[in-house]
């Protein structure tokens, strides 16, 4: 893929997934992303495998480090030491973007707030990711996507049965990666603005804000009509039976989203082997199908229950309307459409082990990216410090003093 961010340098002081994944997207697009980690502890997410909280993959693959840190360079700096802090400022002087998810008090304590860094680089774009925003009574509170994005942002309630325990996120870092991609887009806009006007911006995003964006239509609906979610009711009593999920013979599911049902009804029933339904007075148009929805859904239930999931995936390929198999994560690994578009890319780690990882969801000139692995803790410290002009004797002195890794 074209390195559309070639020549852009990002200094990242961030941990876990939410903000680091924004840096990973920029690295995928060609930016030089320097991840600053404490010399001893590193990004705490590195410890999820060694502590047993997350499984490690064959060949030592720490998947929760790989996904949000692909393609970066890791430098170990102790920002609480004067020498480590001075080196950070040297990196900032030559950077375009500073990216962090540290809370306001931590930024002040480490002297990495906006004014601190703008004093050495007035043109740096300063980017903050937070749990709940930079203002208000909870500006200092931390956040994780399962809480701030999923629970507080409304998704958990919207998809859950009232009175039951709320549903959990579909998978690890679900809200983190959506929010991180949002930050990458904001950085791109800020770089464009600086290019045109010379003005460097402060870019803010929060897990709560992105969670609300994801449920924005429901929030608007709640304000206008006073109800919190679409009424569930009886599955068979729906205004459009072609906007529904159906069970297959082997207890899998297909999702139909054919909003313009008059456009697709005849084609669908013909291609599933029931052409006579196209002229059935009960189902002749959208109004008739709505009035006779229970009968319509019952017939479609019978039709889709007659074949297996795989049989329907082949049989429905020629249907004009929109439908999709309800797939598992493992099925995405072999989905022909995924493979044809390069949405999965192969990555190799130092042990020689390879794995496939989802690329960020944008392509430029139809070229999927080549993904690089995440760095080891402090892997590029020497390399980056030498680029700043330090010789190895000086670097070794800093290592002995504990200022760098």
Image (cartoon, rainbow, N blue to C red):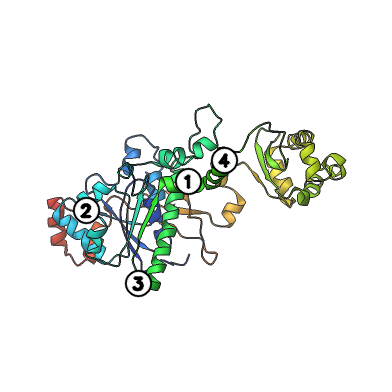
The answer to whether 239 appears left or right of 354 in the picture is right
283 versus 91 height, above or below: above
Alpha-carbon span between mark 3 and mark 1 = 32 Å
* Helix, strand or loop status at disc 4: loop
CB atoms of marks 3 and 4 within 8 Å = no
Mark 1 is surrounded, within 10 Å at the Cα level, by few (under 14), some (14 to 19) or many (20 or more) other residues, namely many
Q: Marks 4 and 1: CB-CB under 8 Å?
A: no
Q: Position of residue 247 (x, y in %)?
A: 68, 35
Q: Dot 2: what SS? A: loop
Q: Which mark is residue 239?
A: none
Q: Earlier in the sequence, mark 3 or mark 1?
A: 3
Residue 381, picture quadrant: bottom left
Which residue is identified by label 3? Answer: 198
Label 2 sits on residue: 77
N-terminal label among 2 and 4: 2
Give the CA separation, mark 2 to mark 4: 41 Å
Residue denoted by label 1: 212
What is the quadrant of residue 281 in the picture? top right
From the viewer's perspective, is the residue at label 4 or at label 1 nearer?
A: 1
What residue did someone put label 4 on?
A: 328
């Amino acid at each position: 893929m074209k390195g559309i961010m070639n020549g852009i340098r990002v200094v990242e002081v961030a941990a876990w997934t939410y903000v680091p994944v924004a840096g990973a997207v920029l690295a995928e697009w060609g930016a030089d992303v320097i991840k600053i980690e404490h010399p001893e502890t590193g990004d705490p997410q590195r410890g999820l495998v060694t502590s047993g909280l997350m499984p490690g993959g064959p060949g030592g693959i720490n998947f929760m480090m790989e996904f949000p840190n692909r393609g970066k360079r890791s430098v170990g700096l102790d920002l609480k030491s004067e020498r480590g802090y001075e080196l950070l400022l040297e990196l900032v002087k030559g950077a375009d973007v500073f990216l962090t998810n540290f809370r306001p008090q931590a930024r002040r304590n480490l002297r990495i707030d906006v004014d601190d860094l703008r004093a050495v680089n007035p043109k740096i774009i300063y980017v903050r990711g937070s749990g709940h925003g930079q203002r208000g009574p909870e500006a200092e509170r931390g956040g994780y996507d399962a809480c701030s994005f999923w629970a507080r942002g409304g998704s958990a309630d919207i998809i859950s049965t009232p009175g039951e325990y709320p549903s959990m996120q579909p998978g690890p870092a679900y809200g983190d990666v959506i929010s991180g991609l949002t930050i990458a887009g904001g950085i791109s806009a800020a770089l464009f603005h600086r290019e045109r006007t010379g003005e460097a911006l402060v870019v803010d995003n929060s897990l709560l804000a992105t969670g609300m964006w994801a449920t924005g239509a429901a929030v608007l609906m709640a304000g206008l009509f006073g109800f919190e979610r679409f009424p569930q009711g009886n599955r068979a009593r729906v205004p459009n039976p072609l906007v529904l999920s159906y069970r297959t013979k082997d207890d899998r599911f297909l999702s139909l989203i054919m909003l313009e049902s008059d456009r697709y009804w005849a084609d669908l029933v013909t291609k599933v082997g029931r052409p006579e339904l196209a002229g059935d007075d009960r189902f002749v148009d959208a109004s008739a199908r709505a009035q006779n929805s229970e009968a319509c859904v019952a017939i479609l239930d019978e039709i889709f229950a007659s074949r297996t999931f795989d049989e329907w995936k082949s049989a429905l390929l020629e249907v004009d309307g929109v439908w999709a198999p309800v797939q598992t994560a493992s099925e995405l690994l072999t989905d022909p459409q995924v493979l044809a578009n390069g949405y999965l890319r192969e990555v190799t780690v130092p042990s020689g082990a390879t794995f496939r990882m989802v690329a960020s969801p944008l392509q430029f000139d139809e070229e999927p990216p080549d993904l690089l692995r995440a760095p080891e803790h402090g892997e590029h410290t020497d390399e980056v410090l030498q680029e700043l002009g330090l010789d190895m004797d000086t670097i070794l002195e800093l290592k002995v003093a504990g200022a760098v890794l």
